[in-house]
Amino acid sequence: MERKTKIHAEEGKQELLITREFDLPVALLFKAYVVPEIVEQWMGTKVLKLENRKHGSWRFETSDAQGNVVFQSNGVIHDVVPNQKITRTFEMDNTPFATQLEFLEFEELTSDTSKLTMHIVFRSVADRDQLLQLPFAQGINMAHNRLQEVVAQLN
């Protein structure tokens, strides 16, 4: 099955361009990234903090079935324009990956469809390529599929 989330990684560049079209109005797609209860549903993680404002911060934590924390991530929110964009950093705790800079753009295609474009900048080409060695593409596609399912039920 073809992945709906597309990842473009140009050779020799330290960035990724990720795009996905959703059968959701842009306002609902944006809410999926800024409302903690919705983020928790589609990401399968606990939102410890999500301050959607300039100079705000965020922190997520994922646990296994026994309650052991297996993944933590955090960052700083640099800019938020409702239904248009979020600029933030992304850092994974206890991993060799350096902090990334993420530009999320939300675009209305029609009244019922929208597009998410994520431009992610890494510290180096090697850091980007190291992430691409993991099942990153499969994981983000699965997460976006889940986002579509969860948020469509809110509509």
Image (tube, grey):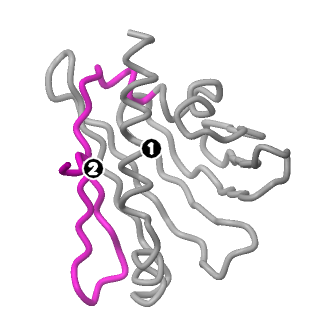
Q: Which residue is rendered at x = 76% and y = 48% of the image?
A: 63
Mark sitting earlier along the chain (1/2): 2
Q: Nearer the viewer, residue 35 or 152?
A: 152
| Magenta stretch encompasses residue 29 | yes
Residue 65 got which mark?
none
Mark 1 element type = helix
Residue 5 got which mark?
2
| Magenta stretch encompasses residue 11 | yes
Residue 121, above or below 42: below
Where does the image place residue 29, in percent across and percent down from the top left? 38, 28
Mark 2 element type = loop
Q: Which residue is rendered at x = 14% and y = 21% of the image?
A: 110
Where are the magenta residues, as a range? 1-30
Q: Which residue is mark 1?
A: 143
Where does the image place residue 34, in percent across and percent down from the top left? 55, 32
64 with respect to 91 (left or right): right
Q: Nearer the viewer, residue 92 or 120?
A: 92
Q: How many marks?
A: 2
What type is the residue that disc 1 sits on? Ala
